[in-house]
Amino acid sequence: YFWQEGGMNCRFEELKRPTLLLGAELLSSCHVRERAFLIARMAYLYSKGQVVCEKMDANALGSLFASFCRLAGQKPTCGENAETKVWQALLEDKLSSSIKERLQDIVPIYLGIAEDVSVEEWRQAVLMSAERVALLLSCDIDEALEALFRYRNIQLGSSNRLKLFLNYP
């Protein structure tokens, strides 16, 4: 669906069935392969249940994960901050008992890896995986990078782009 205020964004909304919203700028100013890259990237994140990596920074994700630990009755080993209690209060009444039971299985995994891998490293790895998949589907590294730079509002001139490419073998 066309999303007038969406800019370069695309996202899925959970209605009766997942619905893809495409921003006006994405539709009007992107080349076909740029558009394919950004849509494939978001589709990958959505299909893996990792859209939160796009929408939240590492501190917010750590706080959210820590609130899951609290909801499962465990003490978080990292990520806890002032937002953790806010997340916990927000989610406590909204999570069904079956979801809370599933948290009992998931939280020990998080607690086991949280010290080894920082939330930001995990977040960046998820985003890079989505970008690799999208690059394979769009088939054009130049247009994929152009789309990613525009999406992230990074302005590079042609000489800086050349320097960027020369730094990577």
Image (cartoon, grey):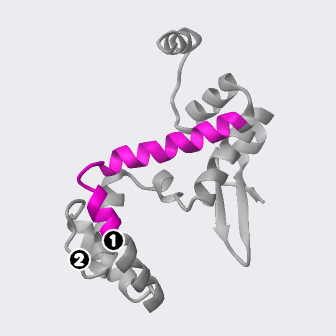
Q: Secondary structure at mark 2?
A: loop
**Which numbered disc flags the more N-terminal residue, 2 or 1?**
2
Q: Which mark is residue 39?
A: none
Say if mark 2 contacts mark 1, CB within 8 Å: yes
Q: What kind of secondary structure does the magenta stretch mostly adopt?
A: helix
Q: Which residue is mark 1?
A: 107
- Look at the image and say whether residue 134 sits in the magenta stretch: yes
Q: Nearer the viewer, residue 88 or 8?
A: 88
Residue neighbourhood size for the residue with mark 2, other residues' Cα within 10 Å, grouped as few (<14), some (14–19), many (≥20): some
Does 81 sit above or below residue 87? Answer: above
At 30% across and 55% down in the image, what residue appears? Answer: 59
| Residue type highlighted by circle 2 | Gln
Q: Is the residue 162 above or below the residue 99 in the image?
A: above
> Is residue 94 highlighted in magenta?
no
Three-letter residue code for mark 1: Val
Q: Which residue is mark 2?
A: 74
Would you say 18 lies left or right of 119 here?
right
In the image, the segment drawn in magenta is 107-136
